[in-house]
Amino acid sequence: MPLITSAEMFKKAYEGRYAVGAFNVNNMEIIQGISEAAREEKAPLILQVSAGARKYARPAYLKKLVEAAVEDTGLSVVLHLDHGENFDICKDCIDDGFSSVMIDGSRLPFEENVALTKKVVDYAHEKGAVVEAELGKLAGIEDNVNVSAREATFTDPDQAVEFVERTGVDSLAIAIGTSHGAYKFKGEPMLDFERLERITKMLPGFPLVLHGASTVLPEFVELCNEYGGDIPGAKGVPEEMLRRAAEQGVCKINIDTDLRLAMTAAVRKYLAENPSEFDPRKYLGSGRDAIKKMVQHKIRNVLGCSGKA
């Protein structure tokens, strides 16, 4: 089956009060683990590629791996660029066959963000692709995105309406309290559901996106720490908060940190228990199994999209 856009996928998610998982991919084992989980759960799937992943794995390899996943699973998959920082990278990905791109102008003044996003939207729509943009800033670090908590600002509902109307964007990533990376926060994580409710009422039926939404599952943090490392202060967004967000109009939830933790924990554990092993297929296979298990958990318990493909 060919790659698809997220338009119909998000419409069903909004009406069904669930979210679609957008999982960041970096190599073959991660793609296989995610895809196998989605196939078994009969879940809609977005595989997304960051600028860092494109640089690491190289664009041609990643695209062919995603195409292989589509062929192997029979799933309809959205191939999405995560955090495109300028027009050129969005154009390159669209020209390379991506069905969806994100232009992240959240660092820019409002008018500049509008102009940049509109430029990408015009080009993407001519080519049959869809566009996600971001309004408001998330704290944390993801590839070259680095925003301190002091600089992080929540999305203004009035600006969100104006932004969508002026750009024609297809979905909007909003800032309501999530954070990139292993969520370092003073006190307990808290999402601004009142702000989310205002935005959804002012943009009825419009698909919203949450970035920085890993839950940082304790079992994987503990395994990472037990077998040769320390992840101090790791704290994720509680799963019940993400499920509530999905029921209130969030159609796409990004997941990256949890994938990294799951694979790293499994690989560290395998090598610690098998110190003489040097076959990458063994320890990377263990990592792939951990990815699959974690993604199935997300689909069933966080996203609510099992059986929705």
Image: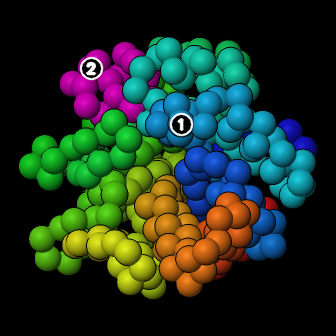
Find numbered disc 1 in the image and state the secondary structure of the residue it sits on: helix
Q: Nearer the viewer, residue 291 or 121?
A: 291
> Between tags 1 and 2, which lies in front?
1
Task: Name the residue at 81% across, 41% down.
Answer: 67
Q: Which residue is mark 2?
A: 111
The residue sitting at 21% across, 24% down in the picture is 109
* Magenta-highlighted residues: 103-118
Percent x, y of residue 258 = 47, 67
In this view, 264 is above or below 27:
below
**Residue 106 is covered by the magenta coloring:** yes
The answer to which image quadrant residue 103 occupies is: top left
The quarter holding residue 166 reads: top left
Depth check: 34 or 252 in front?
34
Q: Which residue type carries mark 1?
A: Tyr
Q: Relative to 214, does residue 294 appear above or below in the rendering?
A: below
Residue 35 seen in render: yes
Q: Which type of secondary structure does the marked residue at label 2 adopt?
A: helix
Residue located beneath label 1 in the image: 56
